[in-house]
Amino acid sequence: MNDLFSIPCVMMRGGTSKGAFFLASDLPEDPQERDQILLSVMGSGHPLQIDGIGGGNPVTSKVAIVRPSSVPGADVDYLFAQVRPDRGVVDTSPNCGNMLAAVGPFAAEAGLVRVRQGTTVIRIHNVNTRKIIEAEIPTPNGQVSYLGEAAIDGVPGRAAPIALTFMDAAGARTGKLLPTGHPSEVIDGIEVTCIDCAMPMMLLEAQALGLTGHETPAELNADAALIARLDALRVEAGRRMGLGDVGGQVIPKPVLIARPAKGGDLAVRYFMPQDCHPALATTGAVGIATACVTEGTVASRLIGMRDLPAVLALEHPSGQIDVRLRLRDGKLLAGILRTARRLFEGRVLARPLNEVGRAA
């Protein structure tokens, strides 16, 4: 016995991200109390998250909260929380498509959905964006399988394939694919595209900032002037997109694009927003690919307008991700292959609510 309290928790890798998974019923209903618990669990307020289970990096400091669906046509609700490693901030404004890859397996093993023989299709309602995503997970012998022969860049080894289909992802936060009403516009002398598809983003050509677009994340992160310039641009983009003052939020994401160097369609450097992603967010990939088939955007003009159906190969620092785009009943569907793995299960220890503030 001790003076901490424990909460059931599962740590999972989803795509190229990693984080803690909780049942909503195991956390406080009050958002402020919930977020205080998450900050304690992850160890935020220290860049290494030394007093928690966070990995000291935005891609390893994520939380998924899952419950039975609250909307018709879906099986489960999934609330994503980005927990800042260095500050006491929990941001539930965006979705995370990589963590999304693990939601289906988590829900199945938690008994929230009926598992079928062979393959189980789970319709996930992302609470952050109010959008539906279909996850097709392998369930041979009526149980979740994590082992297989699928490989994704940014993750070592092979695993069972998980097919994600984003159903009409446009307007995830703003209700519009092009929230400003323009496929491109100029902010502080730089031409950008403000797009909202799975994730609100601001796209611009790397060469407009004197870059090649093929720099490593370490090189980009070390350029303080670049990070400051990108943040100033994205804050203005957020205002124009109707998101208000986004200085304390992680959206919109700044994205540098360039001509491909390794046989793909487009080279991408995706920021989160002050750090360059070591690979590429799944939601980011959906939005960037959509920009490639939207007339007048900086992306479609750079690589040439693509017709549907199309497969867009996006080069990122760890390799490549393919996005399959097609129309169904006039709506754009985006499909991406991901993998996931259950890493540990048990109970995580947190400080009592009246002690959380002392952790920093």
Image (tube, rainbow, N blue to C red):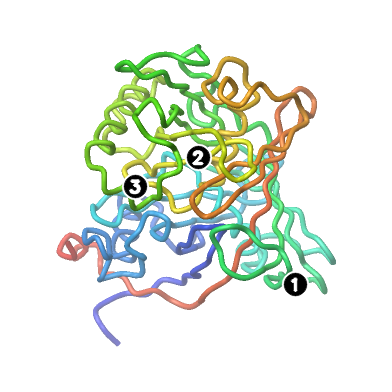
Report the Cα–Cα distance between label 2 and label 1: 37 Å
**Observer-nearest residue: 340 or 191?**
191
Circle 3 or circle 2, nearest the eye:
2
User: Are dots 1 and 3 in contact, CB under 8 Å?
Assistant: no
Where is residue 310? Give x, y as percent: 74, 33
- Residue at horizontal 80%, vertical 25%? 329
Left or right placement of residue 253 versus residue 164 in this view: left
**Observer-nearest residue: 73 or 99?**
99
Q: Secondary structure at mark 2?
A: strand
Q: Label 1 belongs to which residue?
A: 143
Q: Which class describes the residues within 10 Å of circle 1: few (<14), some (14-19), or many (20+)? A: some
Where is residue 193? Give x, y as percent: 47, 22
Q: Label 3 belongs to which residue?
A: 275
**Which kind of residue does numbered mark 3 sit on?**
Asp
Report the Cα–Cα distance between label 1 and label 3: 38 Å
- Residue at horizontal 38%, vertical 35%? 211
Q: Secondary structure at mark 3?
A: loop
Q: Label 2 belongs to which residue?
A: 268
- Residue at horizontal 41%, vertical 21%? 241
User: Are dots 2 and 1 in contact, CB under 8 Å?
Assistant: no
**Which kind of residue does numbered mark 1 sit on?**
Gln
Circle 2 or circle 1, nearest the eye:
2
For marks 3 and 2, the one nearer the N-term is 2
Position of the C terminus, as image quadrant, is: bottom left
**Which kind of residue does numbered mark 2 sit on?**
Val
- Residue at horizontal 75%, vertical 62%? 114
